[in-house]
Amino acid sequence: MDIDQYKVTSNITLKNSQTKVVIDDAEKELKKVRKKLGKLQDTLYAHGKYAVLICLQGMDTAGKDSLIREVFKEFNARGVVVHSFKVPTELELKHDFIWRHYIALPARGKFSVFNRTHYENVLVTRVHPEYVMGENLPNIHCVNDVDAAFWDKRFEQINNFEKHIAQNGTLIFKFFLNLSKKEQKDRLLRRLNKQEKNWKFSPGDLKERKLWDVYQVCYEDAINRTSKPHAPWYAIPADDKPSARYLVAKIIYDTLKQFDDIQEPELDDSIKAHLKDYKKQLNNE
């Protein structure tokens, strides 16, 4: 499989982008690749020089939660941390918009998964610019101050943030789960029709659905402005969940395998020279 076909290397138009691909035996293939990912995570941890940041974005019902559950199932629990970013807290609003994401970055040797990301600050807030007023920013006195120049600056700040962490050893993967409007409707109806899924439904989902076209424009602009070689976006067809999960896992694994310096460290020569003695000491206890 050519994983680069999903990487955004030039401007994309979402209305012309694929939302569904069905891969034969996707669930079986996912089991294979996630085991490999789990072993690779152990090596990454022992190596201790790279961190991995996985960013997941998509419209409501795009399948982010279930993807996280299925893709990272074979990971050592100490090696991956999932952060789900909700409405900013009072404390978070007293800092710049990237602060809460910066302090959640993975340590070297570990993975962090951002379920919704710093991009919410150029997506939800762009659709609802009134939310920016809660940040209490200098020179922003009314919604009219949240203009094109404001968004240009915010995109610049995001690009600088990602460039900085990439230069310091964080490998960045950004996945846009590209869901069709019809499939979202079907998934929302399933939430309403299945009692065990009712808890996932919110009337707010329907309000945001009415803004579908606006969100698509904002997603498209955000992806096109911020897909960089050191922090690429991947547009993943999301209508078929098993295939989407497999694609994400495959892209992460195949990309990380290209870093041939990610190897388990060798023992110091002085320790190697005395391995037999150490074994003998233990066996003679």
Image (cartoon, rainbow, N blue to C red):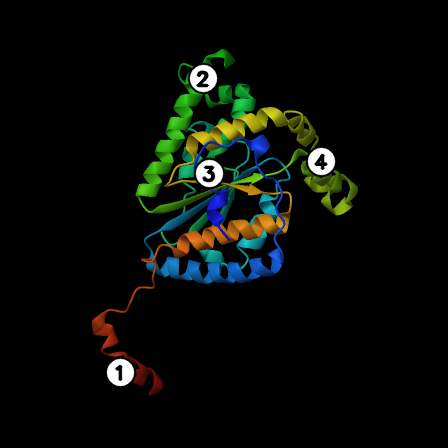
CB under 8 Å between callouts 2 and 1? Answer: no
For badge 4, the amino acid type reads Lys
Mark toward the start of the polypeptide (3 vs 4): 3
- Res 276 visible: yes
Q: Nearer the viewer, residue 142 or 265?
A: 265
Q: Which residue is mark 4?
A: 185
Q: Which mark is residue 148?
A: 2
In this view, which residue lies farthest toward the bottom?
A: 284
> SS of the residue at dot 4?
helix
Q: Residue at x 63, y 25 (%)?
A: 211
Above or below for 75 versus 185: below
Task: Categorize mark 4 by other alpha carbons within 10 Å: few (<14), some (14-19), many (20+).
Answer: some
The Cα atoms of the two marked residues, 1 and 3, are separated by 55 Å
Q: CA distance from mark 2 to mark 3?
A: 24 Å
**Mark 1 residue crowding within 10 angstroms, few (<14) / some (14–19) / many (20+):** few
Give the residue displayed 38% in from the left and 37% down from the top.
162
Question: The disc labelled 3 sits on which kind of residue?
Answer: Val
- Tag 2, which secondary structure? helix
If you read the primary sequence from the N terminus, does the residue marked by circle 2 or circle 3 appear first? 3
* Residue 92, placed above or below residue 63: above
Q: Position of residue 199 (x, y in %)?
A: 71, 41
